[in-house]
Each structure stands twice: as structure tokens, then as C-alpha cells.
Amino acid sequence: EAGVVQSPRYKIIEKKQPVAFWCNPISGHNTLYWYRQNLGQGPELLIRYENEEAVDDSQLPKDRFSAERLKGVDSTLKIQPAELGDSAVYLCASSMGVSLSYGYTFGSGTRLTVV
Amino acid sequence: GQQLNQSPQSMFIQEGEDVSMNCTSSSIFNTWLWYKQDPGEGPVLLIALYKAGELTSNGRLTAQFGTTRKDSFLNISASIPSDVGIYFCAGQLSNTGNQFYFGTGTSLTVIP
């Protein structure tokens, strides 16, 4: 079974430029999460989707961040415009449901560097 | 957000030694998780704990859900070089889908 696939693996952009990250969850997983991991820190939740509905986006900086999960499968996270402080690893994870007994799998992440 | 404090922040041990690390919070959690993250990869779930006092093993790893529900512990016995990585605890406030809060991690280095 393929895991959670993220692309690109690395991205370097200048500040004020837009950037987008893509995530393909494990087939059949209806719950999808975007996390941000700053250097030396644990992951922090940005947004959670149940199918195509964003059910928890309270920690998503909505002035510059947006996300979508059309058709309830793939998801895209966008930053526009990017700031220096957005440099981090952006992790996508998926699970069959919100209960831990279904498992909770992370992708390898996209490492963003804003210069 | 919730603050999960992990200690120690880093560990340097000899191969074959046992390892202990812990995670504490000011809040009560219903679920505790332990993850391992290798460089350039996402975290991988090691152990999940669902009940206060629960003790669960996964090979050489043993984790416990603290009786106060505000802490959890992870032990690794007879460490090997591939145990190197960063270990994160994560807590979930309820079973209804609330977010997981991650600790700041414990970096483990195993010296052959």
C-alpha cells in the first residue's frame, strides 16, 4: 500500500512569493491533516479535513494560508504571500477516521525555505 | 495551544543501554501517542495508549499512560544504532477528533 505522498520534497522561494504544497493521502482515508513543524519543534496542526469539509481550521493563518480538498481526496495547501517565518516542514497525514485505532500516517513532508 | 513538555531534550547513550524519556502536560489527555521521526521523514507512530495506567509494549519499546492522565513515559531497552532519531509524544484531549498536541521532542543518539 502506498503511503501518504507529498510534493515537492523541498521548495525555496523568495519572500512575498506564493507557494503551494500537494498531498495525496492513503486510499480510503477520509480524514486528512496538514501540520507545520518548525525546526526543533513538534508538529502543530493547521487544518483537518473530514472528506472535503474543513472541520478544524482554527490554527490556520487565514490571512495568507488557504487549503482545499476538492472531491475529498487530494489536498493542496497554499501560502500567499510567503514570509520569512513560514520556513518550516509542512506535513500531511491521513487516517480512516478520527479514532486512533484506525491509524494515523504522516507523509515525508515538504521543507519550505523562504529567503 | 497545549504545552507538552518532553524530557530530556537530548540523550547520548552507548549501544545496549536502556533509555527512558517522559512527557508531561498541564491538561488531562484521553490518548497518548509516541512517534519517532528520522531526518527528512515524517513521524512514525510507535505506540498508542488509551487508558490511564495502561502499559503497552512494541518490541523493545514500552510506554505507559500515567495514572494522572497528564503524563506518559517511553522506555527503550537494549538500544541499537537504528534507534537514533527524535521521539515525540502527542496527546489528544478527547476521542471526538480534537487535535493532537505534540511535545518538543527528545533527540536520541546511540553511540556504537
Image (spheres, rainbow, N blue to C red):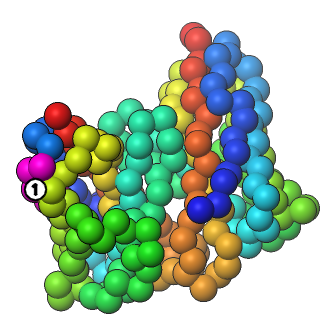
Q: Position of residue B107 (x, y in %)?
A: 57, 29
Looking at the image, can residue B53 be seen? no
Q: Nearer the viewer, residue A31 or A3?
A: A31
Quarter residue B75 falls in: top right
Chain for numbered disc 1: A
The answer to which of A34 and B11 lies nearer the viewer is A34
Task: Judge the density around disc 1: few (<14), some (14-19), many (≥20) Cα neighbours within 10 Å.
Answer: some
Question: Which residue is disc 1 drawn over?
Answer: A18
**Badge 1 amino acid:** Pro
Viewer-closest of A66 and B20: A66
Q: Residue at x 73, y 72 (%)?
A: B30
* Residue B60 at x, y percent in the picture: 69, 39
- Looking at the picture, does residue A78 appear above or below residue B112? below
**Magenta stretch?**
A16-21
Judged left or right of residue A23, residue A46 is: right
Identify which residue is drawn at 66% across, 54% down. Answer: B3
Nearest the eye: A108 or A43: A43
Q: Residue at x 53, y 55 (%)?
A: B45
Q: Position of residue B88 (x, y in %)?
A: 58, 46
Residue A95 x/y as whole percent = 42, 74
Q: Is residue A90 magenta?
A: no
